[in-house]
Every structure is written in structure tokens, then in C-alpha cells.
Image: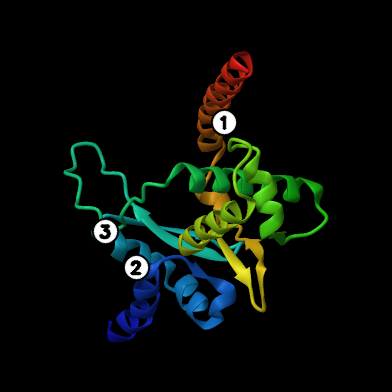
Amino acid sequence: MDILLESMSKPVIALMKGVVFRENDERLWQQLEDGQSALRDYVQVLGLELIVDASEGYAWLKTREPLEGEEPLPRLVGRRKLSYPVSLIIALLRKKLAENDSSGEETRLILSVEEITDMVKVFFPAGGNEARLVDRINSHLNKIADLGFIRRLKGRNDKIEVIRILKAFVDAQWLHDFDERLNQYRETIGAGSNDQGHEN
């Protein structure tokens, strides 16, 4: 029993801190895979569910949905409310990831900050300060990196790798709902531009 608890402790602690990636620690990943059944039972008591994607090489904990008639437990894994720009960038990166996968040319999706800025700026009113926009995009990218969805390449701070776990957190329904909100936003911006045009 002591050996089992010892083998579980490191994976549980790592999972409580965030997403566990196989490439970051092969030994820890092996412990996680070997003790997967026991880990599931353990975190279930805490109201959590263990999600493991062996093919992509990542695992994380999410709050377990309460069973019928079961009292919901306090949340151990908090929800983060994302700002509009952060949500927009995440949605655009998720679509880029889907395009990259369908092309079959490469497995890693790496974009420059300039490319991401070009993708994003079409959704903001024209005429803003370009340098200020790049600074804001970098700030938003740092928040997305904190979520574990992207990382900056070592020695190339202007290059961003999109982490494939983004696919698990942003599904088709999320994208559909966000697309609808984007269309409404574009219509509002378009209406404002047309009004200005008539006044001139």
C-alpha cells in the first residue's frame, strides 16, 4: 500500500498543479499511465475526473459532474473567465490547428507573433497604433501560455507553438458559439463604420 501511495503522490501533485505532458517528464508520465486506474479512483473522491490522452501525450484533471441525486462538491479546479481578446485568439489558434491537422504536412503548429497579430487585427477597428496592438497581443499570448495552450520557442520569443491540448478544451460547439458572437460583433463594427461614412 505504501509503495502504491508513493507511486501515486507525484502524478497527483503534478496533476493538481496543471496539465501533465509526456514530453516534459517521461518517468512521471510512466508512473501516471501505470497507476491510471488507482489515480482515477483517488481523484474521484475529490470530485475530479482524470483525463488522459495517450496518443497526444497529455493528461489533466477536470471537475466531475455530480451523479443524479448527488450533492455537488466544492470545486478544486477553478474556472477562468476569459476576456474577449483572449477568447478570440484561442478560437483563431484552434482553427489554425484544425487546418494544420487536415493538411497532413506537419504535426507541430508554429506561428510568429506577427502572423497571429495579422490574424487578430482584422477583428478590431482600423486606425489603431500598430506597436501598441502588438504589445497587447503579446500580453494576451502570455495569458494563453499560462493556460498551457501555447508556448514560446526557446531563443525565439517571437515564435509561438500551439499545444495540441487546445483541441481537448476547445470543441466544435465552443467554436460555433464563439463564431456567432463574432458575427454579432462584426455587424456592430460594420454598422458603426457605415454610420461614420454617412456623416462624412
**The residue positioned farthest toward the top in the image shown:** 198
Circle 1: element type: helix
Circle 2 Cα neighbour tier, 10 Å, few/some/many (<14 / 14–19 / ≥20): some
**Label 2 with label 3: CB-CB less than 8 Å:** yes
Q: Residues within 10 Å of mark 1 (few under 14, many from 20)?
A: some
- Residue 123, image quadrant: top right
Q: For the point 67% across and 45% down, which residue is it?
A: 119
Between label 3 and label 1, give the one nearer the viewer.
1
**Lateral position of residue 125 relative to residue 68, left or right:** right
Quarter in which the N terminus is drawn: bottom left
Name the kind of residue labelled 3 in the image: Leu
| Residue 76 disc label | 3
Instruction: Identify the residue shown where x is 26% and y is 55%.
Output: 47
Task: Using residue 36 as the reference point, say whether residue 129 is left or right of it.
Answer: right
Tell me residue 115's x, y (percent).
Answer: 71, 53
> Label for residue 179?
1
Which numbered disc flags the more N-terminal residue, 3 or 1? 3
Mark 2 and mark 1 lie on one chain; the one further toward the N terminus is 2
At numbered mark 3, what does the secondary structure look like: helix, strand or loop?
loop
Q: Residue furthest right?
A: 105
- Give me the C-alpha separation between circle 2 and circle 3: 9 Å
Q: Can you identify the residue that label 2 sits on?
A: 16
Q: Position of residue 27 (x, y in %)?
A: 52, 83
The percent coordinates of residue 89 (x first, y second) are 57, 47
> The residue under label 2 is which amino acid type?
Met
Front in this rendered view, residue 170 or 65: 170
Residue at 67 percent of width and 79 percent of height: 155
Q: Secondary structure at mark 2?
A: helix
Q: Amino acid at mark 1?
A: Asp
Q: CA distance from mark 3 to mark 1?
A: 30 Å
